[in-house]
Image (cartoon, grey):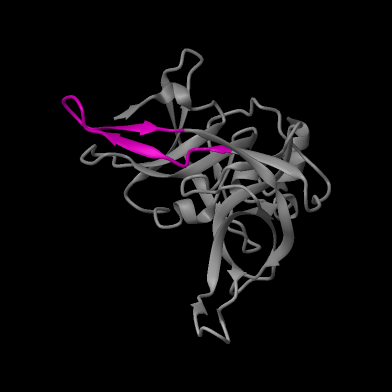
């Protein structure tokens, strides 16, 4: 059973794996969004282990009155160019009016994301339930780079001064102050910087140990990895063309 469904938006949604027999609780997978009519985008790592399996992959949207609206995913495919992106067909229409820019953005660009990096199993009452917790996060682009993928070419990516906790994967990255889709969040990376180098006082012999400060940066695929995203869900057409029609 899912509770707190009024938290979710209509087309930036949490993903779950449902047991059709109803034996176990739904398994939370990550975030997804609907950028064009009947087209859903998420991260491949959110769904790859379940595609073709016995469980249904469902996006949990909502009705105008706040009631839950489960949407079954079909035609789930990975991006053919190696990005950690997946397309699927879903019975939903975009409502937030995202548009896709023509170019990437420079370091320092303010960005934000919305998603579901948190779920809580509630055991009060007769049966356990799952509370879906949304979060709004913002930051800026710290690095523009190519992320090498084994077996594929380099994938255009951003490093972000923004948290990207587990569950935000698949969330849209949006330029702050606009409705421009600039990427998709897919993970985070720890980066250690040396604050104090180890040294020994020549007189006292006292050692000062090396100190490392660990910083965490979010990672997102750039719009360049999204523009030509295509598959059964898009009818073979690039995603950028379909977004221009909405």
The extreme top residue here reads 65
User: Residue 243, position in %: x, y?
Assistant: 73, 37
Write down the quadrant of residue 101 in the picture: top right
Q: Write the residue at 83% across / 50% down.
A: 103
Q: Nearer the viewer, residue 148 or 123?
A: 123
Q: In which quarter of the image is the N terminus?
A: top left
Residue in the picture at 77% in, 45% down? 109
Residue 156, image x, y percentages = 71, 60
Say above or below: 77 vs 7. Answer: below
Q: What stretch is highlighted in magenta?
A: 114-133
Q: Which residue is drawn at 64% across and 32% down?
A: 37
Q: Taking 135 as reference, is 17 left or right? A: left
Q: Which of 214 and 49 is in front in this view?
A: 214
* Up-down relation of residue 72 to residue 93 (above or below): below
Count of marks overlaid on the render: 0
In the image, farthest residue toward the front: 203
Query: Taking 12 as reference, is 162 above or below it?
Result: below
Residue 59 is left or right of residue 93, and the answer is: left
Most extreme residue toward the left is 126
- Vertical placement of residue 227 versus 144, above or below: above
x and y, in percent, of residue 139 in the image: 66, 43
Decide if residue 70 is on the left or right side of residue 233: left
Asked whether residue 197 is drawn in magenta, I would say: no
Q: Nearer the viewer, residue 107 or 196?
A: 196
Residue 9: image location, x then y, percent: 53, 26
Viewer-proximal residue among 111 and 19: 111
Looking at the rendering, in which quadrant would you find the C terminus? Answer: top right
Queried whether the magenta region covers residue 119, the answer comes back as yes
**Residue drawn at (46%, 49%), measured in percent from left and top?**
166
């Amino acid at each position: 059973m899912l509770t707190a469904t009024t938290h979710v938006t209509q087309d930036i949604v949490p993903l779950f794996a449902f047991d059709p027999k109803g034996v176990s609780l739904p398994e939370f997978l990550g975030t997804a969004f609907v950028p064009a009519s009947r087209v859903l985008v998420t991260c491949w790592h959110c769904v790859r282990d379940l595609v073709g399996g016995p469980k249904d992959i469902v996006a949990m949207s909502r009705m105008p009155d706040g009631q839950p609206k489960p949407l079954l995913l079909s035609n789930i495919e990975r991006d053919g160019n190696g990005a950690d992106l997946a397309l699927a067909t879903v019975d939903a229409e975009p409502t937030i009016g995202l548009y896709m820019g023509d170019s990437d953005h420079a370091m320092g660009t303010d960005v934000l994301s919305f998603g579901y990096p948190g779920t809580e199993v509630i055991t009060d009452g007769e049966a356990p339930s799952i509370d879906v917790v949304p979060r709004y996060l913002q930051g800026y682009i710290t690095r523009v780079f190519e992320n090498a993928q084994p077996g594929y070419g380099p994938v255009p990516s951003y490093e972000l001064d923004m948290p990207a906790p587990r569950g935000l994967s698949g969330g849209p990255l949006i330029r702050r102050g606009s409705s421009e889709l600039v990427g998709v969040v897919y993970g985070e990376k720890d980066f250690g910087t040396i604050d104090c180098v180890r040294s020994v006082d020549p007189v006292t012999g006292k050692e000062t140990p090396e100190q490392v400060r660990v910083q965490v940066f979010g990672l997102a695929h750039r719009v360049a990895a999204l523009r030509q995203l295509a598959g059964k869900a898009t009818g073979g057409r690039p995603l950028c063309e379909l977004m221009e029609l909405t």
